[in-house]
Amino acid sequence: MRKPLLVLVSAVALAGCSIGGGDTYQGVEAPNRGVTVQATGTAKVVPDGVIIQFAVTNLGESAEIATNQVADLADKAREVLDNADIDDKDIASQSILVNEEIQYNSDGSQESLGYRATQSFVVTIREENDAGAIVQDVIAAVGDGIRVDGVTPTVLDNEDALNQAREDAVDNAKAKAEDYADLLGIDLGEVQSVSEVSSPVVMRPVATAEAGMDSANKEIQVDLGEQDVTVTIEVRWGIKK
């Protein structure tokens, strides 16, 4: 029974010890004192690409007829995109749907109008200034069987913007840490760690294009605007003793 009693006393004695920042106990170093802050940096950039979302749709007497007609409309859209030198890797089908379309009447009855087939696409336009003309050409080729869901300016090459955002984030972190040091009456030491705590975010305003136009000669223009690329970091400084 003597040995367990000695172990218990040793544990109680250790629990009563207070280890200050940077001190050691039996050769083990305690965590260093420090100041940790998070900061976000932002860089503004003009989009260099446009994402187009559209669908081709048709109502037919049967599912097979509707599907065949939609396949034909999709081929017309692809032909326009191919003539505009859009790479196959930048054209993706989002969904292909076929369902019976039901009309509900005021007297409570219902009737089948046929089958509606729809195929939706997401297309990346890497020549941003061509986006409006491409949208217009697709509308003209497909006709009333098209639905344009969105035209969204996007940043495809954001490396320079990310570097600027990170630089801004570091400057903001330094300013915040120095404010805390002044408030607490301490002096900052060396940087102990830096981590990027959030993935780079691009704030994307959305532009839309309508299928209807006032005149055959009027062209669709996609306004690119300016977007924010943001990065959030966490930095820890030591405290000078």
Image (cartoon, rainbow, N blue to C red):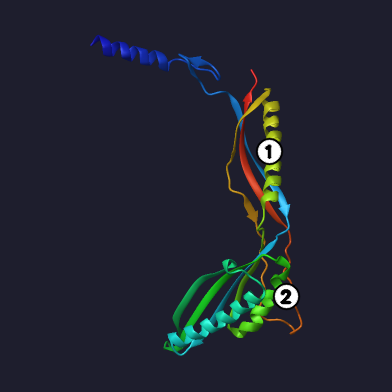
On the question of residue 122 being in view, the answer is yes
Q: Is residue 103 visible?
A: no
- Image location (x, y in percent) of residue 60: 48, 88
Is 19 situated left or right of 241 in this image?
left
What residue is drawn where x is 76% and y is 83%?
217
Provide the secondary structure element on which disc 2 rests.
loop
Residue behind mark 1: 170
Task: Tally the numbered discs.
Answer: 2
Residue 167, position in %: x, y? 70, 41
Does 71 sit left or right of 126 as displayed?
A: left
Residue flagged by tag 1: what amino acid is it?
Answer: Val
Query: Which residue bears the numbered disc 2?
Result: 220
Q: Horizontal placement of 97 versus 207: left or right?
A: left
Quarter of the view holding residue 205: bottom right
Badge 1 vs badge 2, beta-carbon distance below 8 Å: no
The residue depicted at 44 percent of the width and 80 percent of the height is 99
Q: Residue furthest left?
A: 1
- Give the class, few, some or many, for how many residues have Cα within 10 Å of label 1's Cα (few <14, many ≥20): many
Q: Is residue 38 above or below residue 55?
A: above
Q: Nearer the viewer, residue 36 or 50?
A: 50
For the C terminus, the image quarter is top right
Q: In the image, residue 166 lies at what x, y percent?
A: 67, 43
The amino acid type, in three-letter code, at marker 2 is: Ile
The CA span between labels 1 and 2 is 41 Å
